[in-house]
Image (cartoon, helix red, strand yellow):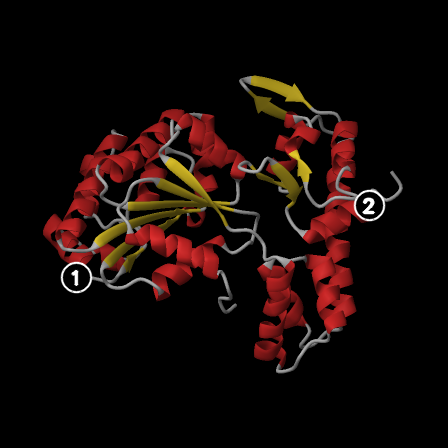
């Protein structure tokens, strides 16, 4: 899918990169709103060779313990090329003269085994030394941690100290040393809030929202895709219909128009809504057999099915509601189930997509 729009977000991030590293940035937004596409577009197309980007996507790893977390950051296991690195001099040559973007921090495997078996701080100190070498070479290092929520299990289950040490280290890179720009991407705003609190990031981190397209941009995106994929213009009625079903979520708009090559628009949209409605129906049915619980302030709270239904009813007439209108344990549960999205800065809850919103209205119409 070709990149489209996001001029405002691109300008903001480029302005940050042009300045001195001073703060950690959390790039957050609903599922499939285009966070990764945005950051990749910027680093691949908008940055000069004066930058050296270390891009780490935690989604590509199964992370359940400390060593797996460290391996995800470094490049010892990523491909044969890095396995050929024998000493640190080769690493320094790679980071100062190699590609602009590296998918991790290069390190000789023997050094990894020797240094990082026990202490997480050893890994961070090695990373700090690499970033210093990048800076000395005249390039500005940029560290991007994508799909941050994928480290949630290892952090929440048994290694909470790992999170604090990681983010205190990132604070050192930004606010204290002014050494490296740091961006953390995630669709899990609850986990970001947890990170902000547990990492003691008051005054040390900021949020950047990458939301679904507004209606005007969504309609322009449809025009763009129709010309690229279908080689024709869509009628205003077709564009309105698409927006009413899927809203401004880029990946859904693309999927609809791509399928229009060989299927009728109404059939595409009706099937998408039917699938989303069935998922929501099965979710609600499951509540008859399980007792949903959430942990809130070290207390396990059980949630009633009626409370969940009453919360969803609020969206029959409104796309957005205040988080004050839904009990905290209830909206936490619905956010964790990817039914709702929380914007913690605005204190606003909304369905993760227009499709889910339409499914809520359809399924709860008789309630």
Q: In the picture provided, is 244 more to the left or to the right than 230?
A: right
Residue 363 disc label = 2
Q: Residue at x 21, y 33 (%)?
A: 122
Q: In the picture provided, is 221 more to the left or to the right than 113?
A: right
Q: Where is residue 230 shown, x and y percent of the image?
A: 63, 79
Q: Where is residue 322 shown, x and y percent of the image?
A: 66, 35
Q: Is residue 303 visible?
A: yes
Element at label 1: helix
Along the line of sight, the residue nearer the viewer: 92 or 310? 310
Element at label 2: helix
Q: Dot 2: within a 10 Å radius of its alpha carbon, few (fewer than 14), some, or many (20 or more) residues? A: some
Number of disc labels:
2
Q: In the picture provided, is 11 more to the left or to the right than 96?
A: right
- Above or below, comparing residue 252 to residue 131 in the picture: below
The earlier-in-sequence mark between 2 and 1 is 1
**Residue 172 in which image quadrant:** top left
Q: Residue at x 71, y 64 (%)?
A: 242
Residue 217 disc label = none
Q: Where is residue 271 shown, x and y percent of the image?
A: 76, 61
Disc 1 marks which residue? 97
Q: Dot 1: within a 10 Å radius of its alpha carbon, few (fewer than 14), some, or many (20 or more) residues? A: few
**Separation of disc 2 and disc 1 at Cα?**
58 Å
- Above or below, comparing residue 120 to residue 102 in the picture: above
């Amino acid at each position: 899918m070709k990149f489209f729009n996001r001029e405002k977000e691109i300008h903001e991030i480029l302005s940050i990169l042009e300045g001195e590293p001073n703060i950690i940035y959390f790039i957050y937004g609903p599922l499939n709103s285009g966070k990764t596409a945005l950051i990749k577009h910027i680093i691949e197309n908008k940055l000069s060779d004066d930058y050296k980007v270390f891009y780490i996507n935690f989604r590509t790893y199964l992370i359940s313990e400390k060593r797996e977390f460290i391996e995800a950051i470094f490049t010892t296991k990523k491909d044969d090329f890095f396995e050929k690195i024998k000493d640190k001099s080769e690493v320094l040559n790679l980071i100062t003269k190699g590609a602009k973007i590296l998918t991790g921090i290069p390190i000789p495997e023997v050094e990894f085994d020797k240094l990082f078996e026990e202490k997480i701080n050893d890994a961070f100190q090695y990373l700090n030394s690499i970033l210093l070498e990048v800076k000395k070479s005249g390039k500005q290092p940029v560290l991007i941690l994508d799909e941050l929520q994928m480290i949630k299990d290892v952090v929440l289950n048994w290694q909470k100290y790992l999170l604090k040490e990681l983010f205190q280290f990132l604070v050192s890179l930004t606010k204290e040393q002014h050494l490296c720009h740091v961006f953390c991407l995630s669709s899990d705003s609850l986990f970001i809030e947890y990170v902000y609190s547990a990492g003691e990031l008051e005054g040390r981190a900021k949020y950047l929202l990458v939301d679904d397209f507004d209606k005007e941009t969504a309609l322009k995106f449809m025009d763009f895709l129709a010309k690229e994929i279908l080689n024709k213009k869509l009628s205003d009625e077709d564009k309105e219909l698409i927006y009413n079903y899927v809203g401004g979520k880029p990946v859904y708009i693309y999927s609809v128009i791509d399928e229009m090559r060989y299927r009728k628009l109404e059939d595409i949209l009706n099937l998408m809504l039917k699938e989303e409605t069935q998922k929501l129906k099965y979710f609600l049915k499951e509540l008859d057999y399980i007792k949903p619980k959430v942990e809130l302030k070290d207390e396990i709270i059980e949630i009633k099915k009626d409370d969940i239904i009453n919360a969803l009813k609020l969206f029959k007439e409104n796309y957005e509601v205040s988080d004050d209108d839904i009990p905290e344990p209830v909206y936490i549960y619905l956010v964790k189930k990817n039914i709702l999205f929380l914007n913690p800065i605005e204190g606003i809850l909304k369905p993760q997509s227009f499709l889910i919103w339409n499914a809520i209205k359809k399924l709860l119409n008789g309630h």
